[in-house]
Every structure is written in C-alpha cells, then in structure tokens.
Image (tube, rainbow, N blue to C red):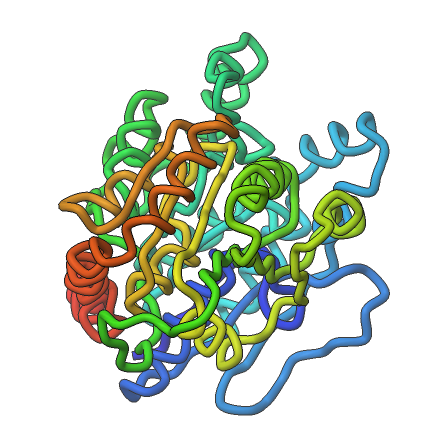
C-alpha cells in the first residue's frame, strides 16, 4: 500500500511524543514493505526541501514552529486563519493528487490547516485519524490539573463546536487512551467514525531484565523542559529527598524554553540535551526509575512507554491516560502537582528497591502491547 502520514512536525523539528509516534509508524510501514510519504510543516525561510530517499517528506511553510514566540493577539489571529486555511487545503490536496495514495493517517493538524481532512474526503481517500491530545477541544492542547473548567468556558465550547464541524468524522479514529476517547465524545467529536482505543506504538526496545544497575539510585526524566511537564516540581521534590539521601541522583534529559531556568534552580541535577533514540535507550537502562511529574492531562506519554519497554519502573502523575498505561501494578502514581507526595513516593522507591521487581515485570508485560508490529497489524486491517 501507499500511505501518507500527516503531522504538523517531523524531523528535524521534533518536539514531543507525537513526532516519535509518527516516525515509529513510518519506519514500521517501510520495513513491512509499504510505500510511505509525509506531509508536515517547517519554519518559514527554512531551506529544507522534499527529500527523495526511502521516505519522501513534503515540508509546508508555517509559523507554527515558532508560534509561542509571537504576541498573544497575533497568535489568536493565526489560530483563526489556521482553522480555515484554504491555501493549506489546496497544497495538501495537490500533493495527495500527485502521489495517488491508498490511505492517509492524520495526526496533529495545527499548523497545516484544519481543512486538510476535507481535502482527503474530496479525493475519496480512506482516512485514519490518530488523536494525540486535546488540540481539537482547546487550541493549546493542554489542560492543567486544577484548571479543568478551562475547556468548559464559553470561548472553549465555541471553539470545540466549530472544530467538530470542521474536522467532521474521518473513517476511523484511534485513541491511545480511553480517557481521550471519552473527552472527545463528551464534546461530540467523531460521532460517525469507527472508534478504537489502541495505545501508541514504540520501536523495539533492547532486552532488559528486572535487575537494575548498581551504584547510587538514579532518577530520570526524559521530555520537554517546560513548566507543564512538572520539571520544577520534580526539582523541588528531589531537593527534599537529597537532604536525606545525598547519594541520590537526578538526570533531566531534553530541551525546551525553560532549560536555563531549570538549570539555575536545579543545583546538583544533571542536565542533558535530548540524547537521540539510541542514547536514550542506554540512559533508560542505566537508571533506576523514570519520573514523569506532568501538571497537565496527558494521553499516552511516549517516555513512559519507552521506560516500561526497557524494564524501568515508572513514577508518574495520576492524570489523564497515564493511569491506564500503569494499570495492573505496572507503575506507581502520585497526586498531581503535590511536591510532598512526589517526594514521599521517591523516598519510598529508594527504600523499597527489592519490591520493584514485580512492578518492573508488570510494566514489561504491559509494554508488549505497544510493539509496532502488533500496532501495524491492527491499523492495516482498518485501512485496507
């Protein structure tokens, strides 16, 4: 089959888990013998062009990548344009006509224009949409713990209602968590679509046993260094336990707008740039526990999936789809946005390392469900 993957970002402009999911799917499809091409955005004035290797990538100019640097009023105007971007509609339609593909898998559409699904329907191409967050319900895509009423405001309800009409109902919609499916159904999205809950895929992880490395206890965070990821909360909790366990270590691996501020606050914390896929696997295997202290409702965090697959116990906020990932004793949850509760759980883990084997084993069993080959079997049946 010839399959198009559409997502607002892709290499070399990766930011979060959605881009890694798209990359995993693309590589898996190519390995399975399918022809794949990608439509994504790039910052304006970037010199990147269509690539002509195993994977063709069409980069469309957009302000999306640097949107957070623009004034608030300008961002509002941009969002309105993005909802009805007729220019993007025709660009995507032209690419799809030229490629003559069998199916399109859409992901995050912000920056590409939300009229893209209409171009797909106009060409009568089968569409599978993969939901990643609340982007269609709220333009930020973020719902903070303690601010749940934000998506019920007058403006948010109008936005969601309008977006529901614009994106309409693709043939199939996959939700990586039941939580995300329920959130969209509550806002009357995808009523006519075939809906399926299927956790995001991860690439094959290196074999890992239940025995963790020796030496000082090493906590690890992998992800964007942003306030909503709970990085500052983690640093404060680590400072608390560091007084009692001076040999404990914390590594924060990633990039983001809050990197400098986090480094200034996190004396004694080791900071690394995003290490790349191979190095990230080594980092996971050399740590004792992944901490994922998100302050927002998340769907299916890629970092948690990778840690489970690598045999690493996970301590995470009890928010959104995270409890589904860590169900059946596959991880440890703590009350969101609570420094004391996070510090207590971190201290418990240090003092109960012999009790982590059961959690590690349950996590690895859960991770087997995320294998890319299993995932592709499901979606290829749907779009065939």
Q: Residue shown at 35%/33% (left/top)?
A: 318
Image quadrant in which you'd find residue 125? bottom left
User: Which residue is most to the top?
Assistant: 154
Query: Residue 3's x, y, as percent?
Result: 37, 72
Identify the image quadrant of the N terminus: bottom left
Q: Residue sitting at 20 percent across and 53 percent down?
A: 355
Tell me, yes or no, if residue 383 can be seen here. Answer: no
Q: Is residue 19 above or below residue 280?
A: above
> Going 52% across and 56% down the picture, which residue do you hit?
248
| Relative horizontal placement of residue 122, taking residue 8 as reference (left or right) | left
Question: On screen, 130 above or below 47?
Answer: above
Residue 334 spot, x, y in % from top left: 36, 33
Left or right of 18? Residue 364 is left
323 and 200: which one is in front? 323
Residue 67: image location, x then y, percent: 75, 44
The answer to whether 131 appears left or right of 150 in the picture is left
User: Is 127 on the left-hand or right-hand side of 98?
Assistant: left
Q: Quadrant of the C terminus?
A: bottom left
Residue 151's spot in the image, x, y percent? 49, 18
Which of 125 and 105 lies nearest the eye of the viewer?
105
- Residue projecting furthest to the bottom: 53
Tell me the quarter of the picture where residue 367 sits. Answer: bottom left
Res. 285 visible in picture: yes
Q: Residue at x 76, y 30 (%)?
A: 77
Foreground of the two, 21 or 63: 21
């Amino acid at each position: 089959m010839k399959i198009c993957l559409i997502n607002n970002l892709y290499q070399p402009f990766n930011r979060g888990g959605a881009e890694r999911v798209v990359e995993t799917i693309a590589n898996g499809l190519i390995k399975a013998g399918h022809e794949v091409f990608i439509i994504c955005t790039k910052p304006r004035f970037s010199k990147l062009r269509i690539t002509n290797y195993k994977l063709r990538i069409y980069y469309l100019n957009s302000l999306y990548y640097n949107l957070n640097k623009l004034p608030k009023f300008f961002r509002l105007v941009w969002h309105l344009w993005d909802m009805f971007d007729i220019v993007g509609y025709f660009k995507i339609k032209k690419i799809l006509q030229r490629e003559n593909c069998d199916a399109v898998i859409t992901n995050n559409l912000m920056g590409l224009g939300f009229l893209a699904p209409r171009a797909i329907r106009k060409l009568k191409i089968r569409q599978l949409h993969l939901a990643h967050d609340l982007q269609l319900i709220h333009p930020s895509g973020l719902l903070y713990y303690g601010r749940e009423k934000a998506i019920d405001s007058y403006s948010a309800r109008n936005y969601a209602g309008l977006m529901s009409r614009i994106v309409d109902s693709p043939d199939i919609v996959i939700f990586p968590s039941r939580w995300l499916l329920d959130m969209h159904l509550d806002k009357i999205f995808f009523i006519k679509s075939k809906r399926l809950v299927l956790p995001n895929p991860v690439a094959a992880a290196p074999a890992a046993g239940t025995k963790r490395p020796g030496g000082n206890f090493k906590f690890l965070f992998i992800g964007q260094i942003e306030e909503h990821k709970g990085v500052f909360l983690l640093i404060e909790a680590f400072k608390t336990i560091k007084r009692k366990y001076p040999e404990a270590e914390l590594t924060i691996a990633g990039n983001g707008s809050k990197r400098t501020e986090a480094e200034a606050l996190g004396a004694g914390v080791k900071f690394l740039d995003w290490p790349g896929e191979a190095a990230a696997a080594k980092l996971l295997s050399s740590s004792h526990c992944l901490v994922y202290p998100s302050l927002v409702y998340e769907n299916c965090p890629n970092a948690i999936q990778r840690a489970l697959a690598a045999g690493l116990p996970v301590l995470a906020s009890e928010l959104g789809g995270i409890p589904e990932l860590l169900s059946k004793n596959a991880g440890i949850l703590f009350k969101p946005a609570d420094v004391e509760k996070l510090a207590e759980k971190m201290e418990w883990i240090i003092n109960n390392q012999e009790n982590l084997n059961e959690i590690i084993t349950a996590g690895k069993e859960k991770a087997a469900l995320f294998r890319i080959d299993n995932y592709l079997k499901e979606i290829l049946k749907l779009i065939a």
